Image (tube, coloured by chain):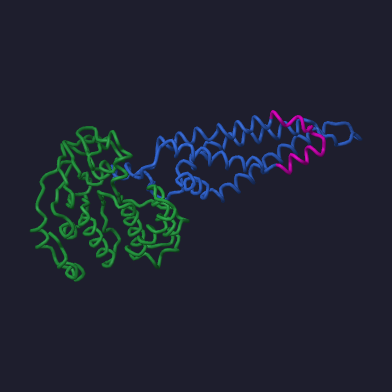
Chain colours: A green, B blue
């Protein structure tokens, strides 16, 4: 579903990414770990068709990000590290706006926004202006936007940022639901324990190169268990 | 649906700015008209009626207004193209076309400038009443100001879309 072959990206300081290759199958979550500036966010931006690679190819659901960016954007749900918002829109309006931008009908927009508010625990904040909500609520809105159109591929950049325990639990559940529907995900995070819980495999990016790809199961077993995780652990499929 | 949304949100952020720009436009036009009219009165012989006003009062006023619209047009276009977003533009990752974004931003900027252009209407009516110009004299100023309204935002829209505050930049430099 996601296929990267010898991907390279040049920035002002040289190669920001070089010779990055891996595949993510349907129903798989691939974690990206590594130090700051390693290239995780850039790699996700390339997969979201926000930047064209200078070398190699990136295909999402069979669509090339360079030649078919619009098709790729229809397939992916992208959560950026930096959230952009309309300060005067309410949370509900924001979600309806993004649903409409994905081509949903007016009625479908209302339903999708209502469903997202419920799923992400945003009901209490539905009428609040975006400029007045907390960082954690903003992050939930950003996540809800990415899920609105039921994308086949999720690209999540530090999705746990600002989330409280309840928010992280919702995120885990939604990632699991997405996997169960056959979707795949690329998740970048600095929190290895959290990444190990979400992912099947984890790739370590440093200085723009994929150093190694490891099975996440041993890391998951070593990660400290959270009470909320234990509560849903029995339903974990992998 | 998309067009309606883009239009709504392209226009929505500009209310405060529109009022300010309109007020400044009215002040500029009124001040120039008053300055030219007063200069004509001062140089006129004692006992000459102040009306009809010298045509220069009208011409000076609309030329100043046109220059003002030309001056603010690029900035208005730039802000319209940047959109209302605080932080990185979250719509960059949506399947929306560049042509739609460009036309919406240009249309929103032109609509805002049209409102701003109407702000000195009371001054122009006063000038008409005082004989500074006849109704038939307004065709050329109207066409020239309409041209300024349509053309001035293009530069700003172009710059904003070429140097978009995109999510890519945030990702590359994060």
Q: Does the segment drawn in magenta span residue A132?
A: no
Instruction: Give the image location of residue A24, x and y in percent.
Output: 17, 46
- Asked if residue B126 lies in the magenta stretch, the reply is yes
- In the current view of this chain or complex, which residue is farthest to the right? B47
Residue A100 in sight in this render: yes
Specify start and end residues of the magenta stretch as a single range.
B121-140
Name the residue located 53 percent from the left edge and 39 percent from the top edge: B107
Screen quadrant of the N terminus of chain A? top left
- Specify the quadrant of the image occupied by residue A226: bottom left
* Above or below for B56 versus A204: above
In the image, A119 versus A211, the foreground residue is: A119
**Which quadrant of the view contains residue B101?**
top left
Give the vertical position of A219 relative to A69 (above or below). Answer: below
In the picture, the quarter occupied by the C terminus of chain A is: bottom left
Q: Is residue A125 left or right of residue B173?
A: right
Furthest residue in direction left, as rendered = A218
* Image label count: 0
| Residue A31 in view, yes or no | no
Q: Is residue A112 left or right of residue A227?
A: right
Position in image of residue A127 (x %, y %): 45, 63
């Amino acid at each position: 579903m996601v296929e990267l072959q010898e991907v390279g990206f040049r920035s002002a300081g040289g190669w920001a990414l070089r010779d990055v290759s891996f595949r993510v199958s349907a129903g798989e979550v691939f974690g990206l770990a590594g130090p700051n500036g390693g290239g995780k966010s850039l790699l996700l931006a390339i997969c979201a068709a926000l930047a064209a690679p200078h070398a190699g190819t990136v295909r999402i659901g069979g669509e090339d990000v360079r030649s078919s960016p619009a098709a790729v954007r229809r397939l992916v749900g992208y959560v950026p590290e930096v959230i952009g918002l309309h300060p005067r829109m309410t949370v509900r309006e924001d979600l309806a706006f993004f649903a409409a931008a994905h081509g949903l009908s007016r009625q479908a927009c209302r339903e999708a926004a209502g469903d997202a508010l419920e799923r992400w625990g945003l009901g209490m904040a539905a009428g609040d202006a975006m400029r007045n909500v907390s960082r954690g609520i903003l992050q939930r809105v950003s996540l809800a936007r990415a899920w609105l159109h039921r994308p086949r591929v999720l690209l999540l950049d530090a999705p746990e940022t600002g989330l409280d325990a309840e928010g992280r639990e919702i995120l885990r559940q939604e990632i699991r639901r997405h996997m169960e529907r056959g979707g795949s995900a690329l998740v970048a995070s600095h929190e290895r324990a959290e990444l190990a819980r979400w992912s099947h495999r984890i790739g370590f990016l440093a200085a723009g190169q994929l150093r190694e790809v490891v099975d996440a199961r041993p890391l998951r077993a070593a990660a400290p268990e959270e009470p909320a995780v234990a509560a849903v652990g029995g339903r974990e499929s992998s | 649906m998309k067009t309606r949304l883009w239009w709504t949100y392209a226009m929505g952020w500009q209310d405060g700015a529109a009022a300010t720009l309109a007020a400044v436009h009215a002040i500029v036009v009124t001040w120039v008209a008053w300055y030219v009219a007063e200069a004509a009165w001062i140089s006129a012989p004692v006992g000459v009626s102040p009306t009809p006003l010298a045509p220069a009062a009208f011409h000076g006023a609309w030329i100043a207004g046109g220059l003002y619209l030309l001056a603010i047009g690029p900035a208005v276009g730039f802000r319209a193209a940047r959109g209302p977003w605080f932080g990185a533009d979250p719509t960059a990752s949506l399947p929306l076309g560049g042509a739609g974004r460009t036309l919406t931003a240009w249309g929103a900027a032109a609509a805002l400038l049209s409102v701003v252009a109407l702000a000195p209407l009371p001054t122009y009516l006063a000038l008409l009443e005082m004989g500074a110009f006849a109704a038939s004299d307004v065709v050329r100023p109207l066409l020239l100001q309409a041209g300024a309204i349509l053309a001035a935002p293009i530069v700003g829209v172009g710059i904003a879309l070429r140097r978009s505050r995109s999510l890519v930049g945030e990702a590359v430099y994060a």
